[in-house]
Image: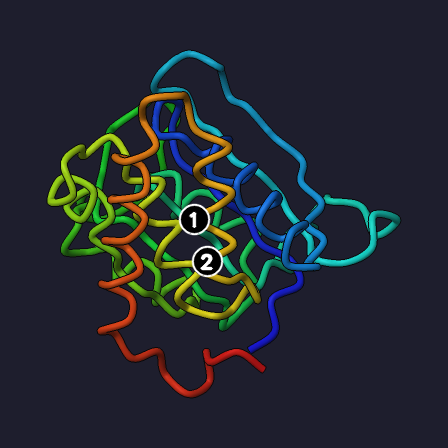
């Protein structure tokens, strides 16, 4: 699988913007150019946030057309469903944190309410391939559940789909997070790396 277009989404306070900025910085160090475009439903904590991103020369731009994204990275389930329903191409991959936070304008269905247990069913209806990631739980096990974005980053790097290196990631994280928080952020990142290393991506999702 080749990733050319992807989105990172969640709600305000989850570190969506920081996650994407770190991804772009790691890419720069590893020779992978990421172009990004932020879309904020409100900078306030709890508002919807997503970032469009493309991999390629800057002249390609960062905008992702509806139905063209290869991957959606979702730190929250309602936003993951909402963004995937618009942007993900059939057969695209979703990295979904196992977390739901009800917010205004959230994703709705005409049947039973959304739940963690129903996420696989709902993504299947969108023709999406799904990897459920316990990012919040992984971050909590590393010492701070709020660092779920760094746990997810570890999963993304370990997946190999973005062409990013773990050693480069560690260096960039150390330079990108607030002083005094480096150890906690790196611990969450390592928890994500270790979890993903124990998973097996289906062959059709492996890096091209």
User: Does 26 sit left or right of 149 as displayed?
Assistant: right
Would you identify the image quadrant in which residue 36 lies?
top right
Residue 9 or 140: which is nearer the viewer? 140
Residue at x 45%, y 40% (from the top left corner): 173
Residue 113 on image: x %, y %: 19, 42
Q: Which residue is mark 1?
A: 170
**Crowd band around label 2 with a 10 angstrom C-alpha radius: few (<14), some (14–19), many (20+):** few
Q: Residue furthest top?
A: 44
Q: Residues within 10 Å of mark 1 (few under 14, many from 20)?
A: some
State the residue at coordinates (41%, 60%).
Answer: 94
In the displayed structure image, the side of residue 63 where residue 119 appears, left or right: left
Q: Please report the residue visible at 28 percent of the width from the left and 40 percent of the height from the top.
A: 148
Q: Secondary structure at mark 1?
A: helix
Residue 49 - label: none
Residue 167 is labelled as 2
Q: Is residue 181 above or below residue 85?
A: above
Which image quadrant: the N terminus?
bottom right
Residue closest to the far right: 59
Residue placed furthest toward the bottom: 203
The foreground one among 166 and 66 is: 166
Q: How many marks?
A: 2
Q: Nearer the viewer, residue 196 or 125?
A: 196
State the residue in front, 49 or 140.
140
Q: CB of mark 1 within 8 Å of CB of mark 2?
A: yes
Q: Quadrant of residue 202?
A: bottom left
Give percent across and percent down for residue 192.
Answer: 28, 55
């Amino acid at each position: 699988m080749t990733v050319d277009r992807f989105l990172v989404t969640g709600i305000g306070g989850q570190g969506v913007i920081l996650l994407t900025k770190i991804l772009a910085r790691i890419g720069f160090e590893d020779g992978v150019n990421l172009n990004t475009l932020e879309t904020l439903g409100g900078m306030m904590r709890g508002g919807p946030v997503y970032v469009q991103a493309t991999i390629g020369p800057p002249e390609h731009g960062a905008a992702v057309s509806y139905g063209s994204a290869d991957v959606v990275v979702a730190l929250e389930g309602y936003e993951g469903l909402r963004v995937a329903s618009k942007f993900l191409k059939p057969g695209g991959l979703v990295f979904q944190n196992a977390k739901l936070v009800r917010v205004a304008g959230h994703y709705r269905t005409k049947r039973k309410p959304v739940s963690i247990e129903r996420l696989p069913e709902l993504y299947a209806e969108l023709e999406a391939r799904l990897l459920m990631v316990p990012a919040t739980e992984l971050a909590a096990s590393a010492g701070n559940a709020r660092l779920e974005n760094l746990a997810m980053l570890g999963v993304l790097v370990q997946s190999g789909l973005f062409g990013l290196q773990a050693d480069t990631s560690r260096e960039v994280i150390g330079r990108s997070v607030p002083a005094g928080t480096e150890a906690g952020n790196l611990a969450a990142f390592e928890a994500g790396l270790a979890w993903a290393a124990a998973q097996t991506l289906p062959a059709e999702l492996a890096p091209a």
